[in-house]
Amino acid sequence: MLESEITDTILAEVGFEHINEGRILLIACGALAREIIHLIEINHWSHIDLQCLPAILHNDPKKIIPAVKKAVQKYKPEYSKIFVVYADCGTGGQLQKLCEQLGISMIEGPHCYSFFEGNKAFAAREEITCFYLTDFLVRQFEAFFWKPMGLDRHEQLRDIYFRNYTTLVYQAQTKDKSLEQKAKAYADQMGLQYEYRYTGYGDLEFALTKVASFT
Amino acid sequence: MSDQEDDIVLSELNDEDLVAQMFDDLYDGLKEEIEDGVEILLARDWTPYSVLTQALVGGMTIVGNDFRDGILFVPEVLLSANAMKGGMAILKPLLIATGAPRVGKMVIGTVKGDIHDIGKNLVGMMMEGAGFEIVDIGINNSVDAYLEAIKNEEPDILGMSALLTTTMPYMKVVIDTLIEKGMRENYTVLVGGAPLNEEFGKAIGADAYCRDAAVAVETAKKFMARKHNQMGINA
């Protein structure tokens, strides 16, 4: 598939591969595909390939473990190094454990909200009442939240789901006014205050730069 | 379940049909209809305990089974639980006033640093629907908050919930404190939440990890039955 043909729905439900005939493989969440491809391109990392798993696995994190395991086992013979671009992502430490068993490493952090902002900075905020969206999740808000939560059918559930949150934080990886407007509208829809934070790629860029320098 | 809600006048149904209709209404999450059904049965001299066990518990058992079997999903179960809550709001004071029997008592809360309560609330409602008395201490609970609730409420079961990998280790802090204070053996400790698993439950010293609300109910019942059997042997 050409990169110009990637849609967010494909990244959410099917996954995506970006093959350079590289030595290093990134096995990543589909929600990170655009950011990772951009980093590969601007840094000319032609020795890095990418296999993205369906981003929707996030809605049932227990499915991430077997999916990553299967991908690692499938591709390990073909690469000199595999790096997993999933944070813990609600797996309760099980993904880290799997990576250790398979002898590979993964990006640090509890979730992408944390590494996009920078793990230290995110932890220092000690926010517990914020609901986070990234660029991908703003684009996929309906598919990842509104519909699976039944809010398209049962609007009365809104306050049951969100009553303990105060703020929707849009962590922007790119500067895109249309995404900002959408994120603000979702905050209103959820009955939350809105905060915009431009994060860029945060720790993702540092982690991948380190991986790319592997010889 | 039923597409003919508009045609049905609850007060005109006999007891058997009304209870069957309440099962449907619980399944469909119709709170007002459940409240009406409860009021009608009480007006027909049903005891609050009979309304709870025969109408609400029966209905929620179907909801729980279908949730367990992947037929119903969280949004629909939340609506059912909300309908149940409407019925329980009427019954609760009456159950206390009439000294109705209960299966057991549970204090439940989400751990410190965590505000997620959907799973916890589902467990609470399903447990209530199974005849347990539930004391819900809410979200973001410190060790002290759990200890105070335990001291005040004297429950059989302590339930702890966490949705974040970063907050789930706090469950061990609570359990370790119970051990330090020599209180651990007095309570059954059940834990749950999306990032947890059975291995984690064992590692922190909980009595059981509960995968979802339906499993929590079954597990709690088993522990209560075991407790009653032990009390019988020791009597």
Image (tube, coloured by chain):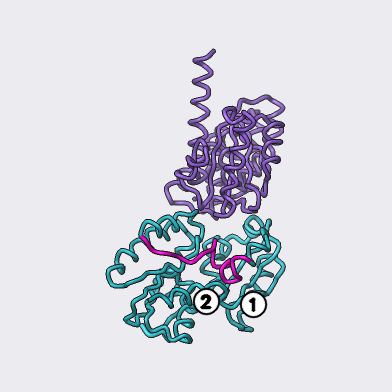
Picture quarter containing residue B189? top right
The alpha-carbon separation of the residues under discs 2 and 1 comes to: 15 Å
Picture quarter containing residue B143? top right
**Could you tell me which secondary element the residue under label 2 belongs to?**
helix
Which residue position is annotated with label 1? A198
Which residue position is annotated with label 2? A205
Query: Which residue is at 72% across, 68% downward?
Result: A193
Disc 1 is attached to a residue of which chain? A
In the rendered image of this protein, which colour is used for chain B? purple
Q: Which chain is cyan?
A: A
Q: Amino acid at mark 1?
A: Tyr
> What segment is highlighted magenta in the picture?
A103-120
Nearest to N terminus: mark 2 or mark 1: 1
Q: Residue furthest front?
A: A215
**Could you tell me which secondary element the residue under label 1 belongs to?**
strand
Give coordinates of residue A139: x percent, y percent: 55, 76
Q: Are marks 2 and 1 in contact (CB under 8 Å)?
A: no
